[in-house]
Amino acid sequence: MKKKDVTPYPALFPNPVSLVTCGPLEHPNIITIAWAATACREPPMVSIAVTPSRHSYNLILESGDFVVNIPFARDVFKVDLCGNLSGETVDKFAQCGYTPEPSLRVTSPRIGECPVSIECYLEQTVHLGTHDLFIGHVANVAIDESLLLNGKPDLSRMDTLAYAQGTYYLLGEAVGTHGFSVKEKEEEPL
């Protein structure tokens, strides 16, 4: 395999697509985030990268919390719209037909139409450059009961989005589970 060196950029892909909600229930906002990640398992934390010029940036700082909502792929138009309109001038909930619903642990609302909502307290802000990293301590996770299989989200029925280099994608088929490589080796005869 011959590789070509290119100008450095954050080349991790694909990334999960999420709709982050912030602000009070009376005047909430939605921002589309493609730079979201698991930051820590115990205590449970996630991170989102937000440009300080975004309307949501100050809403998150003011409230000290946010909710990471995982949308269905069928809502890709709404997802893209939320990333291209400003919450300063547009009510994105009304524009997209989304329902703000109270969260269990934080002041920022969940999106009623999203199958997964991850409620987070703002744990830390890391100033990086064009984006700041908000690290959120996960306070609650709400999952649509109809999409659970043995207590876990059934991703094959969730139909979630991924994002890479300006394009939205559907997640593909499962090709293995954690630890399968070790289990296979243990079962192989010597």
Image (tube, grey):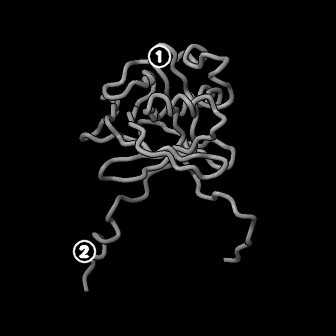
**Depth order, front residue of 34/126:** 126
Task: Tell me the residue that label 1 is attached to.
Answer: 99
- Disc 1 marks a residue whose amino acid type is Thr
State the image quarter where residue 33 is shown.
top right
Residue sitting at 38 percent across and 36 percent down?
A: 121
Judged by depth in the image, the label closer to the viewer, 1 or 2, is: 1
Q: Position of residue 107 (x, y in %)?
A: 39, 24
Left or right: 38, with 43 as reference point? right
Task: Give the side of residue 119 with respect to residue 4, left or right.
Answer: left
Foreground of the two, 131 or 95: 131
Residue at (51%, 43%) from the top-left corner? Answer: 48
Q: Quadrant of the C terminus?
A: bottom left
Q: Secondary structure at mark 2?
A: helix
The label number, if any, that marks residue 78 in the structure image: none
Q: Mark 2: which amino acid?
A: Glu
Against 90, is 19 above or below? below
**Residue 129 position (above or below residue 19):** below
132 or 71: nearer the eye? Answer: 132
Cα distance, mark 1 to mark 2? 50 Å
Residue at horizontal 65 percent and vertical 26 percent from the top: 81
Residue 190, compared with residue 65, is above or below; it is: below
- The location of residue 34, given as percent across then percent down, is 57, 43
- Mark 2: give few (<14), some (14-19) or many (20+) Cα within 10 Å: few
Number of numbered tags placed on the structure image: 2
Contact, mark 1 vs mark 2 (Cβ under 8 Å) = no
- Decide which of tag 1 and tag 2 comes sooner along the chain: 1
Residue 39 image position (x, y, % from top left): 42, 52
Residue 187 bears which disc, if any?
2
Which residue sits at x=33%, y=47%?
44
